[in-house]
Amino acid sequence: MSKVSAGVVAGLLLGAAQGVLSAGTGAPGMALFLAILGRASQGIINGVLAGYAIKSKAPLWRGGLVGGALGFGLGLLAGIPDQSWMQVVPMSAIVGVGCGLAVARAGR
C-alpha cells in the first residue's frame, strides 16, 4: 500500500468515526449522514496532504506530528462557519495524528 493510499484509508475511517461522534446519539438520519460525509471528506484531504508532506522512511513520531499539525489546520478551517473551534479542532488533530502515523508506517 502506498503512503497516500494509507493516509486516505486512515482518514476516511477516522473521519467517519469523528462524524458519528460529532453528530451525537439523537441526530436524525440526514444530519448523521451529512456529519459523516463532511468529516470523512476532511479526513481524506488530511490523508492526502499527509501522504505528500511526510517523506519516505520518516519516524512514526514525525509522521504523527506532521499529520497532527495538518489536522489542526484543517480543523481551524472547518470551524470557521459555525465558530465551533472547541469541538472541531481537537478531533481533527486526532484524525491528523492517525493519518500521519498510517503514512509513516506505510512509507517504511
Image (cartoon, rainbow, N blue to C red):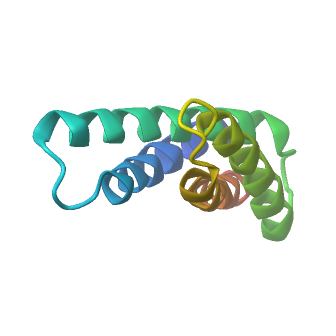
Question: Between residues 58 and 48, which one lies in front from this camera angle?
Answer: 48
Q: Which residue is drawn at the image coordinates 66% and 57% (left, top)?
A: 93
Left/right of residue 53 with respect to residue 77 in the rendered view: right
- Spot the residue most to the left: 29
Q: From what the image shows, is residue 77 above or below residue 98?
A: above
The image quadrant where one finds the N terminus is: top right
Q: How many marks?
A: 0
Quadrant (top left, top right, bottom left, bottom right) of the C terminus = bottom right
Instruction: Find the residue positioned furthest to the front.
Output: 83
Residue 36 visible, this orientation? yes
Q: Is residue 107 visible?
A: no
Q: Position of residue 88 (x, y in %)?
A: 56, 51
Q: Identify which residue is drawn at 78% across, 33% down.
A: 52
x, y (%) of residue 26?
16, 57
| Quarter of image, res 32 | top left
Return the x and y of residue 50 as percentages of the image width and height. Answer: 73, 42
Compare residues 37 and 9 and report the one nearer the observer.
37
Residue located 35% across and 60% down the image: 21
User: Left of 74 or right of it: where is 38?
Assistant: left
* Extreme-bottom residue of the structure: 61
Q: How far across and how far down the image is residue 36, in percent?
A: 33, 41
Residue drawn 64% across and 33% down?
80
